Image (cartoon, grey):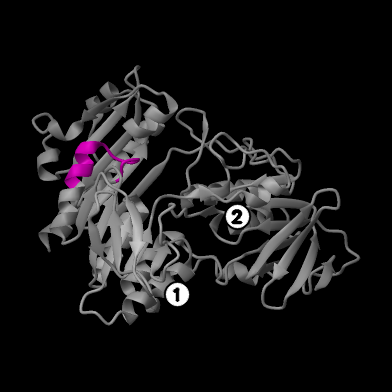
Amino acid sequence: MVIWRISAVAGLGDVSVKRHRLVVIGGNIAGFSAAMGAREVDKHAEIIVLSKELHPPYRRSMLSSIVAQGASSIEGIYMFSARLHDPRMRFLLGVEVSDIKLEEKTVTIEDTRTEKDLVFDYSSLVLAMGGVSPVPSVQGVEKKGVFVLRTLEDALQILQTIRLDCSAHVRAVVVGAGFAGLEIAEALARQGARVTIVIRSRILREFVEPNLSQYLKNQIEQKGVMVITGVSPIEIEGEKGVEYVRLEDDTKIPASVVVFATGVNPNVALAQKIDVELGKNGAIKVDRYMQTSIPQIHAAGDCAETLDALTGRWTYYPVGSVAAKEGIIAGMNALGSKVEFGGVIRTQMDMLFGEGIASIGHGSESAKKIGMKVDLIELSLMKSRFSFLNTCPAKIMVAVDPDDRMVGAQVVSDRFASPYAFTLLSAIQKRITLGEFLEKWQPSPVAFTNLLMKRAHG
């Protein structure tokens, strides 16, 4: 094995000039946002981003679109393209960090293409390793045709598998029904696959209330996708590859493709190796400056904790927009700034199976986990009081705390989810009561006018 020690990277300038060197471990949205945040603070710092992936930074939220639309849509998934030409930044792909020496302040990477170990000195370090998609302990998960959808390579492999399938209709099983599970289920259906969704509980359990889950289940089934609830897979059957998925009740579902979409766990193996403290949720524990328990090491993104702005508690939100915000702050502070992270209100929006879905803040499930008491009010039942609910129909649930303050909202509508959601988000950010909100509730007339005009013109 050849070991190279890198005190300066080719193209990064004169070795004799003492400059700050930031090493970022992880090359997607949190990692590259950290690099951009650092660059805003120091125009001359050396920045090295180490990525295990073979592709430059891309929008993970668009992975299902690769499956739905084909590889021709791949160019639209990349981001930060212009920033990759920064002459004092190096973005190394296909490398894996094997060791961090805290006393020496070095990072060792394995380059799988050259079979050489490279050692980089650093002044400060940002951990942005992201998350991992867990695969349940189900017999047969090692078979050909079983996937998770976490990386661009995963998406391309799923696409290749369904296109090589010679049967008249590809049969696919998606295990899990969070946002990612529904996205890949819809993408497979668009490719002509016969899709079955298998879930232990209900549709979007962490994000919407049971009545909205049931409504969405009905809408999805009307689009030709079967939804099986209250059961889990126990075995993937087949000789050369996937042929059936067997469930707990002994039901066997024919399939040649199985995608597990059962959530995201923080990727903390490297952090544990150097004794970085973890939080109660298993992610890297950070303070409001995104600094870890080890000085000069910051963390951001799906491997790190997130501050919930509504409760002031540290939690885990593996969401791209949150990762970007954390990454920028981590990068800036790694180079000496003192920018405080004010926390986030979890906000997720998507258009799935013809329905716009928005989930903001807390609902019954997340409130239960943290011991918060909430009451749920269905605003969509107030049509006699608010006439626009007849003109612009939507299913709307709001969560309020014991002081009647709005702490969460959920919207499902084929046309009007976004304007309702933004109005509700604004109210939640202002920490107003539901009574105060209802006194003045009037969704954006401009947004609704535009949507109604589009609707009128087909």
Q: Residue at x 41, y 71 (%)?
A: 144
Q: Secondary structure at mark 1?
A: helix
Q: Position of residue 27 (x, y in %)?
A: 60, 62
Q: Which part of the image, by quadrant, shows the N terminus? A: bottom right
Looking at the rendered structure, the kind of residue marked 1 is: Glu
Residue 214, magenta (yes or no): yes
Report the side of 430 relative to 391 (left or right): right
Q: Where is mark 1, residue-wise?
A: 75
The magenta segment is: 204-215
Q: Position of residue 234 (x, y in %)?
A: 35, 53
**Residue 293 quadrant:** top right
Q: Residue at x 46, y 62 (%)?
A: 59
> How many marks can you see?
2
- Quote the CA–CA distance across marks 1 and 2: 23 Å
Q: Secondary structure at mark 2?
A: loop
Q: Residue at x 27, y 47 (%)?
A: 231
Residue 139, magenta (yes or no): no
1 or 2: mark nearer the eye: 2
Q: Where is mark 2, residue-wise?
A: 129
